[in-house]
Amino acid sequence: MWISNNWTDYEVIDCSGGEKLERWGRYLLIRPDPQVIWNTPKTHRGWKRPNAHYHRSERGGGQWQFFDLPEQWSISYNSLAFQLKPFSFKHTGLFPEQAVNWDWVSERIRQAARPTDRPVKVLNLFAYTGGATLAAAAAGAAVTHVDASKGMVTWARENAKTSGLEQAPIRWIVDDCMKFVEREQRRGNVYDGIIMDPPSYGRGPKGEIWKIEEAIHPLIRACAAILSPRPLFFLINSYTTGLQPAVLSYMMNTELTARFGGQVQAEEIGLPVRESRLALPCGCSGRWEI
């Protein structure tokens, strides 16, 4: 498992009974987590005194219960800073487990620049609030950030400003990801690295329906066509149960290794849990690199 263990402003304190107790900066949140199917004693005092608690409904969805939480606050990861706020379906605007992938992408970019000062172009699809975008930009890449939600792109731009990357070479695009990739191929634009974090189900800005089981392999194939002649990396993240590491490996080997060479690794990603000293699984990632 690849574990995001370099945080100071975030931690999973404990997990039990379908929930996790987390520290986001100075605030404690309790949120549901489907991976937490065990019941262990909730001895940490934060279980009784959180700043907010998201309660899942038996009918689907749920709602926040607030005790003492501001409408918005920020946390940092290395040089990056992120604006957080509780919103729909338990989310805060950041997936901390992705930091292990931010570190990997950053190192690939820095390694490429060291010997020849090579410029690196990165495409981030389903880019959400910009964690991977900012990590790549801070490492020296020119980044194209694409998401179907105008609100998420606006939020990502706020995070860029908070991180001191307001003037970084980032293109902010509101678009359906597959349609954008197809247009980039027609334009002849290419990228040295591609990142994608697709949802299980979603809609594009014009109502386009996305179902990951049907769309992910064609998207990988389309993205392979816009990689540069000397590509550096390709990263796919998945929270979808059916897309296990072996499935990601097969698709990436089929479309990337067969064309460019290189190698693929795929693993679960996770977060350390302070009380149990175990790791909480948080989906999986596939990484291809030359």
Image: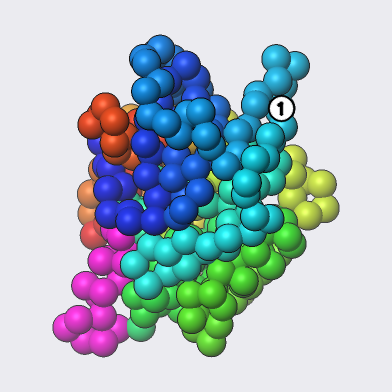
Q: Relative to the observer, which residue lies in front, 244 or 282?
A: 282
Q: Position of residue 170 (x, y in %)?
A: 54, 77
Question: What are the residue bounds of the magenta stretch?
Answer: 103-118
Looking at the image, residue 103 sits to the left or right of residue 133; the answer is left
Residue 174 falls in which quadrant of the image? bottom right
Quarter of the image with the C terminus is bottom left
Q: Residue furthest right?
A: 206
Residue displayed at 68% across by 34% down: 65
Which quadrant is home to the N terminus?
A: top left
Amino acid at pointer 1: Gly
Indicate the colouring scheme: rainbow
Residue extending furthest toward the left: 115
Q: Main secondary structure of the magenta part?
A: helix
Q: Can you give x and y, in whole percent of width and height, for residue 216 in the image?
A: 54, 40
Q: Was residue 15 drawn as part of the magenta stretch in this picture?
A: no
The residue under the point 53% across, 37% down is 50
Residue at 27% x, 54% y: name it: 6
Q: Say which of 31 and 110 sits in front.
A: 31
Instruction: Report x, y in % for residue 289.
Output: 27, 56
Residue 11's place in the image compared with 145, above or below, is above
